[in-house]
Image: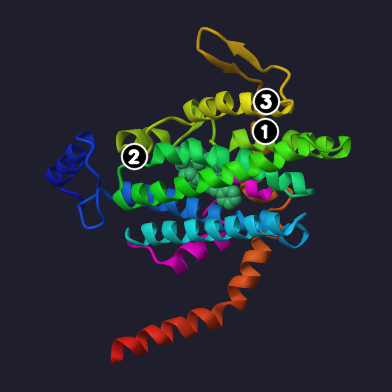
Amino acid sequence: MDSLVQTTAFQQKIDQDLNIEPKDHMPDAYRSHLIRQISQHAHSEVIGMQPEGNWITRAPSLRAKQILLAKIQDEGGHGLYLYSAAETLGISREEMIEQLHSGKAKYSNIFNYPTLTWADIGAIGWLVDGAAIVNQVSLQRTSFGPYARAMVRICKEESFHQRQGYEIMANMMKGTAEQREMAQDAMNRFWWPALMMFGPHDGDSPHSGDAFLWKIKRKSNDELRQKFIDKTIDQATLIGLTVPDPELKWNAEKEGYDHGEIDWDEFHRVIRGNGPCNKQRMAHHVKYHEEGAWVREAAAAYKQRKNEF
Ligand code: FAQ
């Protein structure tokens, strides 16, 4: 049970914009809030390797294949930093994976959509990494030290990812009519799910109250979504892509775009497990996790033996 003195000291630290470190006192609710968010973030990075992995063998050139391989490997690395950051809060990697497999822990809605063409790899890099960066730049100032520090490196890598995705889209838009159509189709399918990545509107976001009190979140779901929309529209226009939202309109007063209504039924359907690829993503993760058991056992045995000498 937290004493009043400890809780006050914790909140004072937060109010002074000081980082909370793993050995510092923290309320149980802060700890569990972070475990939920960081582990879900880690799962997203790792599950996010699957839709892109689908195109490694079919990348259109050796250069494209090398870049895609490096990007996917980066995403695996991001998952590892994030699992490590969550472990400092007292949960084991095994427990986090168990929560993922049982459905207790979520991962980002976006990775439950299929990658049907090469242009989808462009759309993922440009839109999905682009949305992830907007969110993660703000998380560099989150109050928990290990999470904030992981974000600094992750953001640097994500910005390469965003550019490689944009390069794919820009090249396709300079190509044949069929390639342009493919790029537009990818944009049409990924735009709305990318907006959903920022989570429900502020008034419908149950975790935001605590997240702001504890400075886990520095900007709200809607603020970040707006930032992403405003910066992405110019990029789309520049290469000739149309944003699939007829209600999109510049609002001079707020100096940002107004947009059409997001389909929240679709969002909830997908995050509850009923998106186009949820079952496939999880079955794949479970299969390779089970097949990899011998690697984990060997690594643990090696570590134990090393400690004995
Ligand atoms: N998907 O009260 P809030 C990437 C859930 S990394 C699924 O607003 P919160 C890199 C939420 O968990 C992308 N579920 O929650 C990459 C909660 O349910 P719960 C991942 C979502 O936590 C690129 C409920 O709705 N990034 O893409 C989503 O305050 C390419 C109520 O929501 C992060 O995870 C969603 N989109 O705000 C990798 C960033 N949104 O937990 C590979 C860190 C909400 O009670 C390839 N996370 N929910 O069961 C965050 O910033 C926050 O957790 C939010 C949600 C903003 C996602």
Q: Which residues are magenta?
A: 90-112
For disc 1, the marked residue is: 192
User: Mark 3 or mark 2, which is nearer the start of the sequence?
Assistant: 2
What secondary structure is found at the residue carrying circle 1? helix
The spot of residue 40 in percent (x, y) is 49, 52
For disc 3, the marked residue is: 238
Q: Nearer the viewer, mark 2 or mark 1?
A: 2
The answer to whether one can see residue 201 in this image is: no
The spot of residue 179 in percent (x, y) is 83, 40
Other-residue count near label 3 (Cα within 10 Å), few / some / many at <14 / 14–19 / ≥20: few
Whether the residue under disc 1 has CB within 8 Å of ligand 1: no
What secondary structure is found at the residue carrying circle 2? loop
What secondary structure is found at the residue carrying circle 3? helix
Residue 215 shown left or right of residue 233 in the figure = left
User: Mark 3 or mark 1, which is nearer the start of the sequence?
Assistant: 1
**Alpha carbon of mark 2 to alpha carbon of mark 1: how far?**
27 Å
By secondary structure, the bulk of the magenta-drawn segment is best described as helix
Q: Are marks 2 and 3 in contact (CB under 8 Å)?
A: no
Which quadrant: the C terminus? bottom left
Q: What residue sits 30% from the left and 86% below the top?
A: 307
Residue 188 against residue 34 in the figure, above or below: above
Tell me which amino acid carries mark 3.
Leu
Q: Nearer the viewer, mark 2 or mark 3?
A: 3
Residue 158 is inside the magenta segment:
no
Tell me which amino acid carries mark 2.
Arg
Q: Nearer the viewer, mark 1 or mark 3?
A: 3
Mark drawn on residue 141? 2
Q: What residue sits 16% from the left and 40% below the top?
A: 8
Tell me which amino acid carries mark 1.
Trp
User: Mark 1 or mark 2, which is nearer the start of the sequence?
Assistant: 2
Quarter occupied by residue 260: top right
Mark drawn on residue 245? none
